[in-house]
Image (cartoon, helix red, strand yellow):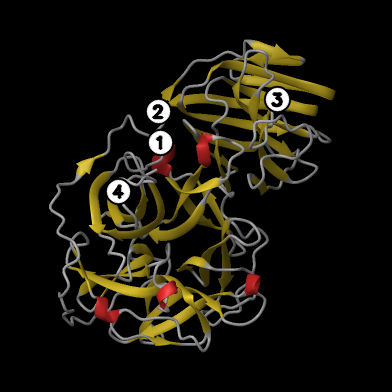
Amino acid sequence: MRTLAGSVLAGGALPLLAMSSKAEEASSSQLTSDVTTSPSAVDDQREFFYRPKDAWAGDFIPYYSDGQFHLYYLVNWRDEHHGEGIPWYKITSKDFVHFTEYGEVLPRGTRDEQDLGVFTGSVVFGEGQYHIFYAGHNPYFRAKGKPEQGIMHAVSDDLLHWRKRPEDTFYAPPERFERNDWRDPFVFWNEQAGEYWMLVAARLNSGPKRRRGCTGLCTSKDLKKWTVREPFWAPHLYSAHECPDLFRIGDWWYLVFSEFSDLVRTRYRKSRSLAGPWITPERDCFDSQAFYAAKTASNGRDHFLFGWNPTRDAASDSAPWSWGGNLVVHRIRQERDGSLAVDIPPSVDAAWIRSVPFEFSTQYGQVRQDGKRLQLTAPTSFACAAAGVMPRQCKIEALMQFDPGTRGCGLMLRTDDAMETSYYLRFEPINGRMVFDRWPRRSSSGELVVHGDHMAGLDRWVHLDPATAVNLKVIVDDTMATAYVDDSIAMSVRMYDLSRGRWGFFVDEGAVRLTEIKLLMR
């Protein structure tokens, strides 16, 4: 997808980030980037979910300005040819479908500099300039007795050409925090306090190691000198609160962060005050394990959530997840109780315009088909129906209503002609969840796994009521897919082992009716 994020506005309410009215000139010393390359449009034949050519992207940093989203991201080539360290690259987009690439905008340093790795941060306008605050990471410094991570600063007049200000670098106070975890700064203007606030992914230096993660707080009057305060939020729950982000809609503030200690998830908390308390909603995450480090931005009407879908090592379903992947963008929607839901961005939804004819020609069990309607009945058994070979890129839509007592039903992807091997997007009413699974399951060594649950981490809680049809939309992009359910829940996945096959629907011990079935291409 194509995303951007910027001066965070509270959809229909108060500005999330108030811009500073000062016009102080920031120093332009320490030239960081000599970008001269012209922007280029992304080839439409590449993946629908954006990633740079011959590389992977992580930790998108969004900023909205002049009618488009400016998306900065960390690039990972995964080879020795490009050398070590991580720089920032940039793209822009108005619709999350078409992108313009600008290449490198914030280069990595050397082994002798703090920012060998230019890690995650944020973009803010203030004091008459644009500012990037980011984490400088150098793994060689720890052996030298120096902090591995520090908060660093760069400035710009045009959001493209950036000048580093290494003299503004500051570190975690060791009397309260672990010195090597001090990253992912998020900066905003706090109108009530009359100063800039910075949220930082930090760790306390005492307590159980797995529970030391906290959201640090620093304050500044001029975006140059920062004072470290007491932690903004320290619940003693997670190892780290990575990529903190904050925004407001109406009366509610939302604190977004990512953690990897319980489950790999981007989560959020809500509060009516920046002072807290920060309330945990019933459903506190936005997507599955295949969506991480998400940050937000608003165009003044809607808020959007920008994360990335990681790849797996060796392009295998049973291999570990890798850092970096493809951009995925969700639209954020506020519920009546102040909790958040996500749905497909309208421009992404509208990108799939070409209807593809289909027929469920391969069937098993009791199946009735009438045009774009399908009924599967198997009160004590299994039934399924498969259409033709699924395009590499497509969107599948359907309304799915199941009978009371149905044990499971859902969508099949890349099913073979015998309907034996397949991926399954399975809804389990008795468990209140949807899961992504495949058959056959294999271990990392390639052995068949007879026992075991679904693909770990690829599941979501979802309220399933037989009286209400499930509204399902699934975007498939080669090895990736993202499912949206009832315009409120998203689940991203990866698919490697089965690269080609049919698509269809199934039911376990029950009955399901599918209407308004669509297969769409771009």
Of labels 3 and 1, earlier in sequence is 1
Report the Cα–Cα distance between label 2 and label 3: 26 Å
Mark 4 packing: few (<14 Cα in 10 Å), some, or many (20+)? few
Residue occupied by mark 4: 82
Residue occupied by mark 2: 353
Mark in the foreground, 2 or 3: 3
Report the Cα–Cα distance between label 3 and label 1: 27 Å
Mark in the foreground, 4 or 2: 4
Which residue does the image show at 21% across and 73% down from the upper left?
A: 129
Circle 2: residue type: Ile
Front residue (pair 38, 411): 38
Mark 2 packing: few (<14 Cα in 10 Å), some, or many (20+)? few
Circle 1: residue type: Ala
Report the Cα–Cα distance between label 4 and label 1: 37 Å
Q: Position of residue 58 (x, y in %)?
A: 41, 52
State if disc 1 and disc 2 touch (CB < 8 Å): yes
Q: Disc 4 on helix, strand or loop?
A: loop
Residue occupied by mark 1: 350
Outermost residue toward the left? 36
